[in-house]
Image (tube, rainbow, N blue to C red):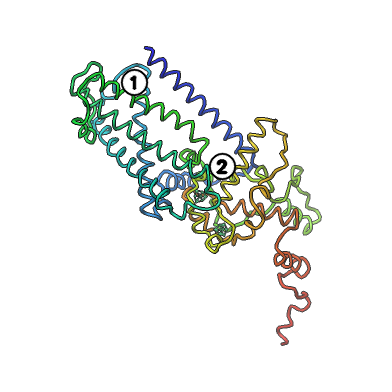
Amino acid sequence: MLEQLLFVLIAIAAIWLFARNVKTIRRNILLGKDIDRSDNPSERWRTMAMVALGQSKMMTRPIAGFFHILIYAGFIIINIEVLEIIIDGIFGTHRILSFAGGLYNFLIGSFEFLAVGVLLACIIFLIRRNIIHLKRFSGVEMKGWPVSDANYILIAEILLMTAFLLMNATDNKLQQLEAAHYHTAGSFPVTSALASLLPNNESTLVLIERTCWWFHIVGIFAFLNYIPYSKHFHIVLAFPNTWYSNLNNKGKFNNMTSVTNEVKAMLDPSFTPPADATPGRFGAKDVTDLTWVNLLNAYSCTECGRCTSNCPANMTGKLLSPRKIMMDTRDRLEEVGNNIDKHGKDYQDGKALLGDYITPEELWACTTCNACTEACPVNIDPLSIIVELRRYLVMEESNAPSSINNMFGNIENNQAPWKYSPADRTNWINN
Ligand code: SF4
Ligand code: SF4
């Protein structure tokens, strides 16, 4: 009874903490400006099913894609058993869902194969990151916490899967020994092979089984509360992120309402802008000038580096890394959120995304080719953040490279990007 009570208390605390963390992240995301992404819902559901659930963009790198899908499928499917563990934990039962008979045996057997697959994939990923040192996982932004975070999760997955398999192995042996409480339930095609390696003493087996059971479930509760602080929150956010992704043709820029209104007023003196059309800041200087979809993107980034490894600016040695743009956006947003928690919503810390996190040099290295958005496995759009920050530089600070400023001057004076007067436009006919 004491064990059940302890389990219920731990479960309630873990779920409460997770809900609190999710609420904070939702609050932070909604600090962004509003944008309507409710159009074309059928296309949005299709995109989410293909990209988030079906992992369609992962297979552009087939080996990494295969192992990632294995971990993803294993993580989701094996956690179905967590439902049973929770019910058993609350009521003190043993494998309560075993009444499903053949289906139950099939599921438990499949979970074991998947757990072995997840274990192997995590070991391969650890080797790839720490021994082979894949170039995609390096870069100025991949120092300290992002490296540790990725390793912690892989190690945690290995420990959880090991505990899961050892729990099954000892449970199976206890069933064979007809121990009290351990009635026959489940099929153990993988862990039955470990039976001869386990002790025959019933109380030792129960101790190992209970330790693994508690480790597995407490580990999952801990994992639940770790992921909101980690890039692994993409497990959850990949779904809304793909649903709200940009369905426009890539490269289509949005017009700024305030500028559109000004142009309309110039062309048509009778035009009066809508009463609520108060122009805010042009472009974005800080995270609160970005849209909530940009901020959702930042929290959804898996730090995989596929964007950066496809970025022509990065490939040619420029400072720009689209992954860093997303990571900087998330770090700044977290900072703004923490400031609100500590000092209230109007607190200004004198810092901004532009300047303190992202430099103009990075921004002007972008060719706006969209290779980053094309490569992103969860449909993140780093370019839209780059464009907004550039807009701020140009429109609020007139801070653009001289070649661009010359072009702007020419457009303004000559209605063309070249330095020639409009009156000379047809000179070429005479020459
Ligand atoms: S759009 Fe810019 S950031 Fe993205 S890949 Fe192209 S150059 Fe790199
Ligand atoms: S933006 Fe996309 S491609 Fe780039 S690191 Fe993040 S998840 Fe990977």
Disc ID at residue 296 = 2
Q: x, y percentage for residue 259? A: 73, 54
Crowding at mark 1 (Cα within 10 Å: few <14, some 14-19, many 20+): some
Q: Quadrant of residue 70?
A: top left
Q: Is residue 400 above or below residue 275?
A: below
The tag earlier along the polypeptide, 1 or 2, is 1
Q: Is residue 145 left or right of residue 106?
A: right
Question: Residue at the spot x=73%, y=80% of the render?
Answer: 426
Q: Quadrant of residue 96?
A: top left
Q: Is residue 175 above or below residue 29?
A: above
Q: Quadrant of ligand 1?
A: bottom right
Question: Residue at the spot x=58%, y=61% of the render?
Answer: 318
- In this rendered view, identify the residue nearer to me: 315 or 113: 315
Crowding at mark 2 (Cα within 10 Å: few <14, some 14-19, many 20+): many
Give the Cα distance between marks 1 and 2. 36 Å
Say which amino acid is labelled 2.
Leu
Q: x, y percentage for residue 407? A: 72, 67
Q: Is residue 239 visible?
A: no
| Quadrant housing the C terminus | bottom right
Say which amino acid is labelled 1.
Asp
Q: Is residue 16 visible?
A: yes
Question: Residue at the spot x=56%, y=62% of the render?
Answer: 317
Q: x, y percentage for residue 20? A: 55, 28
SS label for mark 2: helix
- In this rendered view, identify the residue nearer to me: 382 or 255: 382
